[in-house]
Image: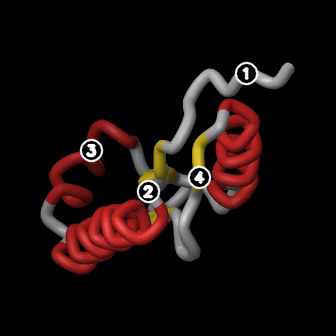
Amino acid sequence: HKQDLIKNKVAGLMVVGHEDGYQHVVGGLMNFLTCLGMIFPPHAYAAWVGESTTDPAVDKEKITNISELKKEFENLVVNCVDFAKKII
């Protein structure tokens, strides 16, 4: 149990969904990836939650054209890269 499968890797999560359960999903993924050896910075995920009655296929164009969402995901990437530069 002393061997990390993934060592010295910084991670961030981008979540797109249609329910408020994204926090539960993020928590489970972060727990699992931490057990594998991943390191998460503060503010390690960005999320967008659509209406629960919307068809995800119909939402694809809407999601890809939301400038605030793009900015949120870009900030997440910058945050992860900056964190990695500081600790690794």
Residues under labels 4 and 2: Cα distance? 10 Å
Residue at left offset 70%, top offset 43%: 34
Going by the numbered disc 1, the residue's amino acid type is Gln
Going by the numbered disc 4, the residue's amino acid type is Ile
Query: Contact (CB < 8 A) between labels 1 and 2?
Result: no
Q: On the rendered structure, is 32 left or right of 59?
A: right
Q: Earlier in the sequence, mark 1 or mark 3?
A: 1
Query: Contact (CB < 8 A) between labels 3 and 4?
Result: no
Q: Nearer the viewer, mark 3 or mark 4?
A: 4
Residue at left offset 54%, top offset 67%: 41
Residue under label 2? 88
Eyeballing the image, is 58 above or below 63? above
Residue under label 3? 58
Q: Earlier in the sequence, mark 2 or mark 3?
A: 3
Residue under label 1? 3
Quadrant in which residue 74 is drawn:
bottom left
Going by the numbered disc 2, the residue's amino acid type is Ile
Q: Nearer the viewer, mark 1 or mark 3?
A: 1
Residue under label 4? 39
Q: Nearer the viewer, mark 2 or mark 3?
A: 2
Residue 79: x %, y % from top left: 37, 72
Residues under labels 3 and 4: Cα distance? 35 Å
Q: On the rendered structure, is 52 left or right of 26?
A: left
* Label 2 crowd bin: few (<14), some (14–19), many (20+), radius 10 Å: few
Residue 82: x %, y % from top left: 33, 71
Q: Earlier in the sequence, mark 4 or mark 2?
A: 4
Eyeballing the image, is 3 above or below 80? above
